[in-house]
Amino acid sequence: MNSSKVKIITNPVVLENLKVMRDKNTDSQGVRIATRKITRCLLYEASRNLPLVEQDVTTPLTTFKAKVIDPDIKLIISPILRAGLIFTDEAIDILPQACIRHIGMYRDEKTLKPVWYYNKVPMEAPNPEKFYIYLTDPMLATGNTLLEAIKLYADKGIPIDNIKIICIIAAPEGIENIQKHYPNIEITTAAVDDHLNEKGYIVPGMGDAGDRIFNT
C-alpha cells in the first residue's frame, strides 16, 4: 500500500464520531448524525486540491484581493448509491457550486463484484483538466465498486490527480486493489481497518453502512 496517497484524518471530532457510528448499539439516527459530522471534516480536507484564483473584495474598510475557488472549474460530487448519499447534504453545503452526479451500483454478495443499475454521469467532459471529481462512499471494502466509478471518469480524459476518493472506513485490501490500477489516486479516509472477512465486510468496521444509515 502506498501510504503517501492515503490521507487518514485523525481529528478528535472525527475519532469521537467514528466510535459512535461503529458501536452496534447506536441507532440509525445516531449513525446518520455521526456520519455527517465525519463527512464534513473529510470534505474540508479533500478540497485542499481545488485551484484558487484572486478576486477583488470590498470590506467596510478597504478593497483587497481575496483567494477563492476558481469559478471556471467543473466540480462534481459523485456519491455511490445508496450509502454514499449521506455525503450529499454536507457536500452541497460546503461546495454549493458542485454538481451532484449519482452512481448506482450494488455488490453481488457471491462474487463481490459490482453490478450497475444507475449512471447519472455526463457523457462528455470538454476541457477535462478543468474537472475535479470527488467519489464518496462510506466504506472502501474490496474497492471493486470504486474502481468502476474511477474508470467512468478517467475514460473521459479527466486527470487522475483531479479525482479523489472520500470514504469513512477503508480496508487495506481495497486500497491495494485501487492503487494497483490507479497508483496516483488520493484517498481521504477517517480510518484504515484491519482486514476484510470472508464475506467482504471490513473488520472491525461498522457492519453494513447502508443498512445502519437508512435503518433497513
Image (cartoon, rainbow, N blue to C red):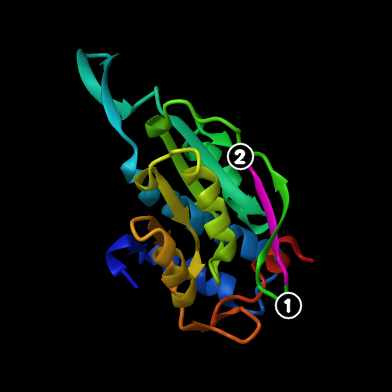
Q: Amino acid at mark 2?
A: Arg
Q: CA distance from mark 1 to mark 2?
A: 28 Å
Residue toward you, 38 or 193: 193
Mark drawn on residue 101: 2
The residue pinned by badge 1 equals: 110
Magenta part, dominant SS: strand
In the picture shown, does residue 7 fall above or below 199? above
Q: Amino acid at mark 1?
A: Lys
Residue closer to the observer: 14 or 174: 174
| The one of 16 and 160 positioned closer to us in this rendering | 160
Magenta residues span 102-108
SS of the residue at dot 2? loop
- Residue at 59%, 38% in the rendered image: 100
Q: Residue at x 45, y 64 (%)?
A: 178
Residue 131 x, y percent position in the rendering: 43, 34
The answer to whether 21 appears left or right of 46 in the picture is: right
Q: Position of residue 159 (x, y in %)?
A: 38, 42
Say whether residue 206 is left or right of residue 76: right
Magenta stretch contains residue 149: no
